[in-house]
Amino acid sequence: MKRQQIEENRQILRPIVGAIVLCGRQNISLQGHRDDSSIYLSDDVDCGNFICMEQYAQGRTLEEFFKSTSKNLTYKSKTIQNEIIDICGNLNTKKITDEICKARGLSGDAIATTIKDFLHDQNLPVDNCRNQGYDGAGNMAGRLSGAAARIQEINKKALYVHCNL
């Protein structure tokens, strides 16, 4: 029974997470003029980007679920949206750090190559990079052969900033 409930919850969250990820990828704001979760099912109300995308992704399949649950259980509040964004950010950070850990070497050249390959695989042009933040280790911050210097050889606008953590 518990596994079935977990799977049902996942099915409910999939279109919600998908809509948030889509908005993020396309640089579309989540909030619209009216993002009241109590009115999201009404066709005559301009309900905002996130809710419209979520409805489109799922159709009306979740309508009965949201009608049968308490009004505060919609998974659509800005708090939930921000939690999902944080989780996605953490997953992306882990993916990036895993790629860096797979680097064949720890030289500035090897790390810069890994970063460039990762950006290429994600369809993110290095030309769009505007800053780099690394620790002060020579393989990262070295003026001649550090990763930051290698990235700046490709894109002068990718300024290196020593991390301040």
Image: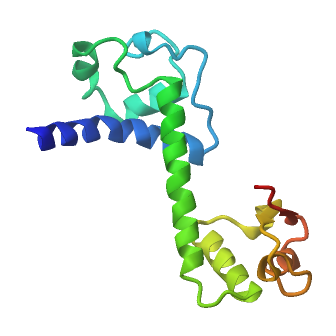
Q: Percent position (x, y) of residue 27?
A: 64, 42
Quadrant of the image containing the N terminus: top left
The extreme front residue here reads 165
Above or below residue 142? Residue 133 is above
The quarter of the picture where residue 162 lies is bottom right
Query: At x 42% / y 40%, what residue is drawn?
Result: 17
Above or below residue 5? Residue 134 is below
The quarter of the picture where residue 116 lies is bottom right
Quadrant of the image containing the C terminus: bottom right
* Side of 45 relative to 154 (left or right): left
Q: Percent position (x, y) of residue 14?
A: 34, 41
Above or below residue 13? Residue 34 is above
User: 103 or 74: nearer the eye?
Assistant: 103
* Side of 97 relative to 133 (left or right): left
User: 98 or 13: nearer the eye?
Assistant: 98
Above or below residue 32? Residue 152 is below
Q: Percent position (x, y) of residue 69?
A: 25, 16
Question: What color scheme is it?
Answer: rainbow
* Side of 55 relative to 123 (left or right): left
Query: At x 80% / y 77%, what residue is drawn?
Result: 137
Q: Percent position (x, y) of residue 29?
A: 62, 32
User: 131 or 43: nearer the eye?
Assistant: 131
Query: At x 84% / y 75%, what residue is drawn?
Result: 141
**What is the total number of numbered labels drawn onto the structure image?**
0
Query: At x 52% / y 65%, what residue is drawn?
Result: 95
